[in-house]
Image (cartoon, rainbow, N blue to C red):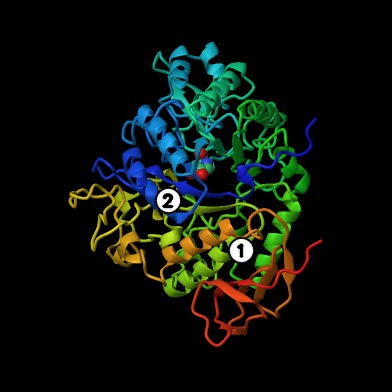
Amino acid sequence: MIDQRPASWWDSAVVYQIYPRSFADGNGDGIGDLAGFRARLPYLAELGVDAVWFTPWYPSPLADGGYDVADYRDVDPRIGTLAEAEALVAEAHRVGLRVLLDLVPNHTSIDHPAFRAALAGGPGAPERELFHFRPGRGASGELPPNNWRSCFQGSAWTRVTEPDGTPGEWYLHLFDSGQPDWNWEHPAVRADFEETLRFWFDRGVDGFRIDVADLLGKADGLPDADAWAPGPKPIADQPTVFEVHRAWRRIADSYPEPKVLVGELWKDDPELFRRYVNPHGLDGGFCFALFTTAPDASALRAAVDRTRHVQGPDGHSPWVMGNHDVTRPVTRLGRRVHFDAWNRTEEPSDVETGTRRARALALLTLALPGNAGIYQGEELGLPEVTDLPEHTLQDPVWERSGHTDRGRDGCRVPLPWEGDAPPFGFGPADDTATEPWLPQPPAWKQLTVAAQDGDPDSTLTLYRAALRLRRAHPGLGAGELEWLDLGTGVLAFRRSSGFSCVVNLSGEPVELPSHESLLLTSGPVAAGRLPVDTAAWLQSPVVEER
Ligand code: NOJ
């Protein structure tokens, strides 16, 4: 039995998340694609991240932005081809970037051939056993089989029309009705996913981010419950999920350089977390603590301590400030009350304050022990787009909530690369006409890559400098942290090799502690005082470390 994983490139890695439809458009149809990504590869190499994670690029009817996968071993024709994907992996490797894909194992798409066969087979067909089909409750089966709710609101069950035209069984979907849940008790489901893992690993892919990694397997009998309530629940943490992850670990470790498996996984209980993240399971889980924490020194310190306690020293779980599901940090941090990124709110935001804080917390995130993640556009300081016209909204949450929740499109708006007006170079250089699939705000002309490139004060320059330092400084990445007490409202800690990070959230400028040199600051420092909402990376003389 191995109790500790060998050191890996992943341990200190910074992973950059690509939302393929919004990164760069190579063919001018308004939708980001692999050609666009390949053309922008030098940008990522220069940025200085270690890996990219692509949210799903597979064929999909887009009931949930691609998290409804119709074919796990191909690329959506709107995004590219398999041959381009293979070329992309090779090119990324050539510039020193690893590539992670998104594995979506809890559910598939209603367009997946296996689900179509299950529908066509009718009640009792063996093809239905790959999913959770059940007769309804009530005199004529008109009520769903249990009371589970979809994560996107509404029932987690949809009734099908049988091949003979009559209303029939119901199928389970913990997300949208376009995303039927697989039955992980079925050996054919397990075998098929193992083949998918090998398929991409054989093409050089370095690992997977695993979507809702804890949901595979449901409690026997699918008992009624508040399915998403905190604590033990029938949809998560079932024995099956651990068996599946172990099998995947064996496959991942069978390659000369073990592949990375990192879960979308948030567990607040150390024992439960380590049942997932251990040498026989996952390498880590994305760590969402910073999503919900106010820009307040003691709250942030408590969140970091709690996370480190839960994960232990070997939980190589990226610290992240945002992703494609939550309010962008600039907007979240510019608010006065609502700091929970999951909770979409109408509270207005002050972009200037939000930008200052997001820059400061970027330095915090990149200085914490372990790995870190950057969601595309954070390095440009993009805000959430809160006023997308209703007819452009695509997130299923908008429809399923009866138009009360605008959903997650506001953080998925295509990136601005250059120029003074939309589409800001999102498409090919000679194409100024095609509208990106979600409209970009005209004000983004100040935030384009070109506008920020070479500007010493830009957020892009800050990220580039921070990532360069992070790679070079022996005190950053994996390792320990020691808190420093610099007074109320100031978050400060020391790493090894003389590195320390100070974040001033106190409401007034503070004296910097003594140091040998100022490595980097997220805003201007005057007369040795660190302004409000600003972070500094400091170098002190290296004392002999035990
Ligand atoms: C988590 C993904 O990040 C999100 O975008 C998706 O809607 C759900 N899982 C369901 O796949």
- Local packing at callout 1 (Cα closer than 10 Å; few below 14, some 14-19, many 20+) is many
Occupied quadrant, residue 272: top right
**Ligand 1 lies under 8 Å from the Cβ of mark 2:** no
Foreground residue, 541 or 232? 541
Whether residue 407 is visible: no
Which residue position holds label 2?
44
Residue at image position (67%, 53%) is 478
Whether residue 399 is visible: yes
Q: Is residue 173 above or below residue 429?
A: above
Q: Amino acid at mark 1?
A: Thr
The secondary element bearing badge 2 is classed as helix
Q: Quadrant of the C terminus?
A: bottom right
Relative to 104, 76 lies left or right: left
The secondary element bearing badge 1 is classed as loop
Q: Is residue 262 above or below residue 42?
A: above
Q: Amino acid at mark 2?
A: Leu
Q: How many labels, in total?
A: 2
Which residue position holds label 1?
293
Q: Earlier in the sequence, mark 2 or mark 1?
A: 2
